[in-house]
Amino acid sequence: MTSDKDYRSGLFFALVTGLCFSIVGIVDKVGSTQTNNPFIFSTQSLLFSLLFSFIFSLFYFKGLPIKEIKKIPFLTWGLVILIGILASGLAILLRFIGLKESTGTFATLSQIITTSVTVILAWIFLKERLSKIAWVFFIIIVISMYFVSVGKLAFLDIKQGDKFILLGALFIGIANIFSKKAVHIINPILLSLGRFLFGFIFLLLIISFFIGNKDILKLSNYWVILSGLLWSVNVIGFNLAIKRIGVTFTTSLLMMGPVITMILEYLLLGYQFTLVQIIAAMVVIVSGIAIILTKD
């Protein structure tokens, strides 16, 4: 049973995570459009996420967490590496490639796709029960995301950038299944740190292989620092929140993220959303909350 202290702290971490999650959609959109190389921007963003997470871990563990690291079973490292490659390697890279042609709102909405995919994968691989109504809501989400992308009630080709973002959301959904198992073995802070570390190593290898690593030492723009900070707080805050108030309540609070992103994108970037996009986005959010509640 959750104590009042755990509930308050969990609620705080969830709200902070939701706020950072909303803002990072705008930051990544602006930062990615101001650079010609999403490979470099995504890798540098991950590098700063790793740096900020490492600094946080020093305060959290009151020094280097060497003892905690030694306690991690050998096979668990395989899970951490896989999570890092999927969630902070492939997914982050695809997100930044997609943001060149998509919106920050669509990128934030993709988190609901990730949540829905996680629920379905948990039903397949972890044998968690999934009601028939949850399948209905998932279909509604897929259809609504289509209309958010095309912006009108018509059968048009979904934006190329949105395809990359949705593919990245799928990789995160797969990584969440592995994370669900790993978080019971490894400290959530170390899991976050490992995710950023192996994701960064993966992207660094990709850059070295395809374009050389000289540009990695040249700062893309100052947005990449803020992006790294926000992603660090986002992932760490999420792991701390679900430990205290559970994944259902935490994820429900994150569903409000796309609303804030849409408002910020309109006010700060002057992006004009159609009525169809606004209604479809609201349907996605409501359906995402419904899926979580029916799963529970």
Image (tube, rainbow, N blue to C red):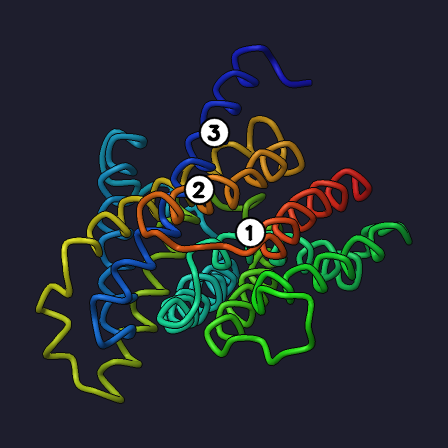
**CA–CA distance in space, label 2 to label 1:** 36 Å
Residue drawn at (46%, 74%), measured in percent from left and top? 161
Instruction: Tell me which label, 3 or 2, sits earlier in the chain.
Output: 3
Query: Which residue is labeled 1 in the image?
Result: 182
Q: Is residue 193 above or below residue 96?
A: above
Circle 3/circle 1 CB separation < 8 Å: no
Instruction: Tell me which label, 2 or 1, sits earlier in the chain.
Output: 1
In the orientation shown, which residue stands out farthest toward the top?
4
Disc 2 or disc 1, which is closer to the eye?
2
Image position, residue 64 (x, y; %): 24, 40
Query: Which amino acid does the dot numbered 1 rest on?
Result: Ala
Disc 3 or disc 1, which is closer to the eye?
3
**CA–CA distance in space, label 3 to label 1:** 24 Å
Query: Which amino acid does the dot numbered 3 rest on?
Result: Leu
Of 216 and 128, which appears nearest the observer?
216
Of 146 and 85, which appears nearest the observer?
146
Left or right placement of residue 144 versus residue 20 in this view: right
Where, by quadrant of the figure, is residue 274 drawn? bottom right
Q: Quadrant of the N terminus?
A: top right
Of 178 and 67, which appears nearest the observer?
178
The disc label shown at residue 15, or none:
3
Secondary structure at numbered mark 1: helix
Query: Which residue is labeled 2 in the image?
Result: 263
Where, by quadrant of the figure, is residue 202 drawn? bottom left
- Binning the other alpha carbons within 10 Å of mark 3 as few (below 14), some (14 to 19) or many (20 upward) gives many
Image position, residue 221 (x, y; %): 14, 60
- Binning the other alpha carbons within 10 Å of mark 1 as few (below 14), some (14 to 19) or many (20 upward) gives some
Does residue 70 appear anywhere in the picture? no
Query: Which amino acid does the dot numbered 2 rest on?
Result: Ile
Of 100 and 46, which appears nearest the observer?
100
